[in-house]
DNA sequence: TATAAAAAATACCATACAGTATGTTTTATT
DNA sequence: AATAAAACATACTGTATGGTATTTTTTATA
């Protein structure tokens, strides 16, 4: 195999396993040893490709966590159609798409925000970047609705975007505490009611 | 000093320092050594009073984390007055009461939920208990508003309670990523608009 | 004041950790 | 085939960890 391709595959393997373990067990308590045991490669291989754990953490955020959020929560906002329907679809469909594993372990981004969001400035910036991207996309969609007269012009797009994001991330954490979906049903009802209020 | 009083004071000291360090640096990465260094006592003292770190964790949750939430977010909901005004007051006053330290390190409960909410069942139950207490108190207040004809009877009290809690906890995490309060202002505007919708 | 128990200190252990030094194997180039 | 560099493996270091064993100090009671 070509060297640069092999290198790329190895790095991708490490990132994938690291993301999985960060998601399941948290960032701080996931050691390099545990990650490399998952890859079936050695510690030497890790330090050949990465300077340290921090560098890996930042790659996991930008290559896995960010992509995940953008794919499921940002990109679909650009679809054509009624903005309010898109909003409801994106948030509700996402929640309903989660399997037991994802409900149990919560949102990878939110987990990182709460675990390392007040520690390393580098993590802070990388995570903030995701939130800002998400916020902007929501604002664009809400503004489009206002322009097309399907959304009440008196509501603040920025405030609504942040309230939507906050509630979504909040419930992803709270759901961890439960073993069934009743709390998610409450959230879903709350969200539906909330979105309906934007209508003209 | 009386023995049982001394014992009680020592335990309280350990709990206070542990809560502080959990809040600042997280649960998992706060070691017994670090806690006991803060208390200026020895490791022997710790293991005289506590069986292990888990037992301390549970005491911190029930004696510090829970008390904190109940005092600031639950008890004030029982005040007399217009339920909607009480709602707005409690949530907004709480947010506005936070100092730089509390904004930086987020909500101790939410931090724990996201860090250990999917690990130890004992932590899970202790934390869920707080959320349930909070949820019930909000439902009671909303139901009172409905009975007194100040709150729209068509909204679900449980759904509204969970949506309020989720957004509040969500923003406490997200705020960690920022160095100023603009994101909090967005949230506050979003919350005000949200609460206004409950009006008849 | 003697004695027992509680409170706290000291010293220790096995394990896990991030990271390093050095070796071996694989791949690319001449 | 020779050589160099990249990819990976092995063995190690120093430090931190949760927890234990044992000793010293403080407090309560007779």
Image (spheres, coloured by chain):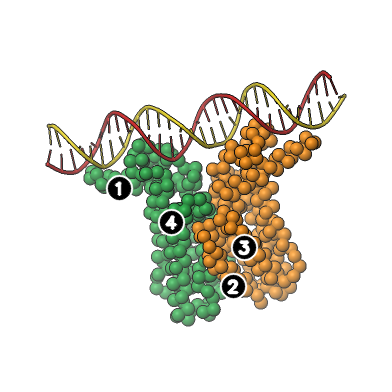
Chain colours: A orange, B green, C yellow, D red
Q: Chain of mark 4?
A: B
Q: Which mark is residue A95?
A: 3
Which quadrant: the C terminus of chain A?
bottom right
**Which of A41 and A122 lies nearest the eye of the viewer?**
A41
Which quadrant: the N terminus of chain A?
top right
Q: Chain of mark 2?
A: A
Q: Nearer the viewer, mark 3 or mark 2?
A: 3
Q: Look at the picture and state if A157 lies above or below A10.
A: below
Q: Which residue is mark 4?
A: B126
Residue A68 drawn at (x, y percent): 67, 54
Residue placed at 76% from the left, 67% from the top?
A: A80
Residue D20, picture quadrant? top left
Question: Is disc 1 surrounded by few (<14), some (14 to 19) or many (20+) residues within 10 Å?
Answer: few
Are tags 3 and 2 found on a single chain? yes
Are tags 1 and 4 found on a single chain? yes
Q: Which residue is mark 2?
A: A193
Separation of marks 1 and 2 at Cα, in angstroms: 49 Å
Residue B128 in sight here: yes
Q: Secondary structure at mark 3?
A: helix
């Amino acid at each position: 195999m070509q060297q640069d391709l092999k290198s790329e595959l190895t790095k991708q393997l490490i990132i994938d396993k690291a993301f999985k373990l960060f998601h399941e067990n948290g960032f701080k308590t996931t050691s390099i040893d545990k990650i490399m045991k998952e890859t079936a490669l050695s510690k030497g291989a890790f330090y050949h490709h990465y300077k340290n754990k921090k560098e890996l953490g930042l790659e996991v955020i930008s290559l896995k966590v960010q992509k995940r959020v953008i794919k499921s929560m940002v990109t679909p906002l650009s679809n054509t159609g009624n903005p309010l329907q898109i909003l409801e679809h994106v948030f509700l469909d996402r929640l309903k798409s989660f399997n037991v594993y994802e409900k149990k372990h919560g949102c990878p981004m939110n987990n990182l925000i709460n675990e390392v969001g007040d520690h390393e400035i580098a993590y802070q910036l990388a995570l903030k970047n995701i939130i800002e991207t998400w916020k902007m996309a929501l604002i664009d969609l809400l503004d489009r609705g206002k322009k097309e007269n399907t959304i009440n012009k008196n509501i603040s797009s920025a405030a609504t975007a942040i309230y939507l994001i906050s509630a979504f991330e909040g419930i992803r954490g709270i759901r961890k505490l439960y073993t069934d979906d009743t709390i998610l049903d409450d959230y879903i009802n709350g969200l539906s009611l909330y979105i309906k209020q934007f209508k003209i």
